Image (cartoon, grey):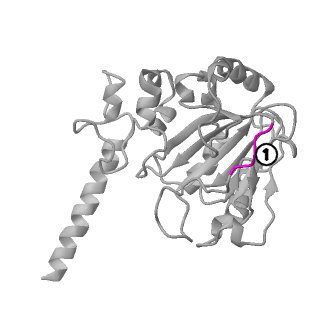
Amino acid sequence: MNGPGTHFAEIIDRGYTVMEGAVSPDVVAAFRSELRPFLDSGPFGRNDFEGYRSKRVYALLAKTPSVASMVEHPDVLALVDQVLLPNYLLSSNLAIDVHPGETAQDFHFDDGGIRLPRPRPTHGVSTIWALDDFTEENGATEVIPGSHLWGDERPEQMDVDPLKITMPAGSVVVFSGLLWHRGGANNSDSPRLGITPQYCEPWARQLENMILAVGPRAADYSERIQAMIGYSIHPPFMGYVDGMHPLRCLDAGYDPASTGENEQSRRFWEDYGGRTGRALKDQK
């Protein structure tokens, strides 16, 4: 596995990086076992984007506890830490089981819901974890290297060939929310399972309403995951509930000093107030 500096440099340069063997076969097996009932009972996709021959399972933290080891994988979050602001959020977290006969998705980029003109800084980081081997034949994710730097260009306008991200089960591709990509066609005789935890800036709206999606199960997870679900404050007070920190909704004994966010807010307002006061004084 490459070092963290190399992975970050690859994201900056080409828009994505691959970490092979990031979790063990035991982690993969445990997750697949937890997910199986939801895949067996779930429907195929409702539209071409979801995939008429694909099954999707949403709200994974409410259904498959072992997914936490991938959502908060330290090597992945070390990269996200370098791209997004502190207290970034988990924007979506779903499984996608691509069955034989599925066609390729349309190309898209994941933070397209943030309607700011490109080129611009990325406001999201996406990951796709392979729970089966991703191969040339079974629908491996396809990316357009360097497309995270594009402006108004679209794949159909450009003379570029997509690259299939082939990787063994237990591996993960981490990429900019601006990277054009798609799920590939499954021309094999077996399903291809992956999951895609995606992260966004703390001021952005999550694709999945995580607090409602995870519900009371949020109390079972680490403080890091709770913060990414939305039980956190983006200074000075974005995300409060009834004027107070949202962790009070999970923990009646919540200590306001435990996260350090109250202190961050205090410093923000002292800084903000000081700057505003100086600016007004300078205008007189």
Q: Is residue 197 left or right of residue 230?
A: right
Q: Quadrant of the C terminus?
A: bottom left
Instruction: Estimate the x, y position of residue 202 in percent, counting from the top left.
Output: 43, 49
29 up-or-down from 96: above or below:
above
Instruction: Tell me which residue sits at (73%, 25%) in the image.
Output: 27
Q: Is residue 102 magenta?
A: yes
Q: Secondary structure at mark 1?
A: loop
Q: From the viewer's side, name the closer residue of 271 and 216.
A: 216
Q: Quadrant of the N terminus?
A: top right
Instruction: Estimate the x, y position of residue 104 in percent, counting from the top left.
Output: 74, 49
Instruction: Tell me which residue sits at (32%, 45%) in the image.
Output: 263
Instruction: Estimate the x, y position of residue 166 in percent, counting from the top left.
Output: 84, 46
Q: From the viewer's side, name the closer residue of 155 and 210.
A: 155
Query: What span is colored magenta in the figure?
Result: 101-105
Q: Say whether residue 157 is visible.
A: yes
Check disc 1 and report the residue beneath it.
185
Q: Looking at the rendering, which quadrant does residue 22 occupy?
A: top right
Q: Is residue 20 left or right of residue 54?
A: right
